[in-house]
Image (spheres, rainbow, N blue to C red):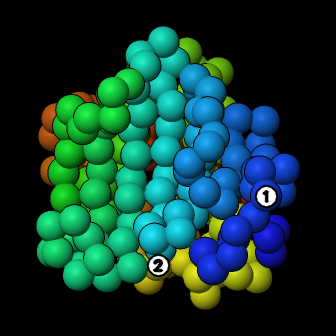
Amino acid sequence: MENIIDFKRYVSLLESHLYVTSHWKVVSEESGISKDEGFGYLIFNQSGVFSIVYSKKNEKEESRIDFYVSKESSPDKKSLCKVCIIDRRGKETFKKNFYEIDEDTIWEIICLFFDYSDLERISKNERQKFLIGFTKSIKAVYNSEKNDQLPSSFKSFFNLISDWCKSKDKKIGDKEYPQDLEIVNIVNKFIKDFNLIS
């Protein structure tokens, strides 16, 4: 994993992919990879941006969360992360910037990413693959020997999720994401299973 999670040096294409599950992988650089439909990617870019990307099935678009090293390094100079949908031409069709990552925003970030990934529209089996892969991947990256290279925005994101999930009875409600109660139910399954998946 050391060669995978490294912003500072070029890694050859053969060494630049690490499968965490059959449908989720860690990638050292986004350029030069073709994203398969129904697969998730955790991408370390040379610019220091860390992205979680899901290439949607049959949609020719991807949902993603971009984590920035600092607000100043973000495109708008104010955000710590962005959740968006990118179409096949590389254009953002939906996006929301987050200026803080805290208890007030963490579940909206997750809900938006799950919603933009169309989890409510895929089969239960595909949804389970997504949730297991997403959970295992963020844990693997956070717990890696090179986690000092992760942006602090991602570390805050992970720690807030982890702290929340330590309590077995915690759930989110429609207050956190009134747009779609089915997505709220999917997020609550993610919360419930977070500590069971290693």
Relative to the observer, which residue lies in front, 48 or 103?
48
**Which residue position holds label 1?**
12
Q: Nearer the viewer, mark 1 or mark 2?
A: 1
**Which residue position holds label 2?**
151
> Label 1, label 2: how many angstroms apart (C-alpha)?
23 Å
Q: Is residue 81 left or right of residue 158?
A: left
Q: Is residue 81 visible?
A: yes
As drawn, 133 above or below 191: above
Coordinates of residue 64 in the picture (x, y in percent): 40, 46
Which quadrant does the C terminus fall into?
A: bottom right
Relative to the observer, which residue lies in front, 33 or 116?
33
Q: Residue furthest top?
A: 58
As drawn, 107 above or below 41: below
Q: Amino acid at mark 1?
A: Ser
Coordinates of residue 162 in the picture (x, y in percent): 53, 71
Looking at the image, which residue is at 17% across and 75% down? 77
Q: Is residue 154 visible?
A: no
Looking at the image, which residue is at 78% across and 36% down? 22
- Mark closest to the chain's N terminus, 1 or 2: 1
Q: Secondary structure at mark 2?
A: loop
Decide: few, some or many residues near mark 1? Use Cα within 10 Å; few <14, some 14-19, many ≥20. few
Q: Secondary structure at mark 1?
A: loop
